[in-house]
Image (cartoon, grey):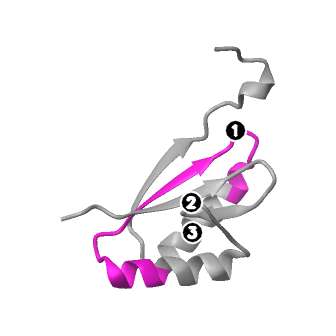
Amino acid sequence: AVQVVFSVLLPQDGRILVNGEVSNDHEALELRARRALAEDAGLRAVIQADGAVSHRHVIAVLNTLKRAGVIRIAFGALPELAEEGASS
């Protein structure tokens, strides 16, 4: 079976992106999570936040996913941007 990942990105600007698309608020995030869960009961969510995003915001997103019924939730960090002085 194909593993579907519900990707939630939290960039520094405060937006919530779900699978690359902007989710306007927590209600919209919860609705999308419920829909995705209805399509795949084994849904896994991954929250990736920029290092500058507040802990409170990350926890609020986590709680929204839990409210939607998502129980498989992993965390990741967004990679540092090259413009912050990193050269490759």
- Please identify the quarter of the rendering in which residue 78 is found: top right
Q: How crowded is mark 2: few (under 14 residues within 10 Å), some or many (20 or more)?
A: many
Of 2 and 50, which appears nearest the observer? 2
53 up-or-down from 59: above or below: above
Q: Which of marks 2 and 3 is in front?
A: 2
Range covered by the magenta-colored residues: 34-57
**Residue in the image at 24% along x and 63% along y:** 2
Q: Nearer the viewer, mark 1 or mark 3?
A: 1
**Residue picked out by circle 3:** 63
Q: Residue 51 has which mark?
A: 1
| Image side of residue 14 versus residue 31, left or right | right
* SS category of the residue bearing label 3: helix
| Image side of residue 77 versus residue 87, left or right | left
82 up-or-down from 52: above or below: above
Residue type, numbered disc 2: Val
Of 35 and 65, which appears nearest the observer? 35
Q: What quarter of the picture does the C terminus occupy?
A: top right
**Residue picked out by circle 2:** 8
Q: Disc 1 to disc 3, how far (Cα)?
A: 19 Å
Q: Disc 2 to disc 3, how far (Cα)?
A: 13 Å
Residue type, numbered disc 3: Asn
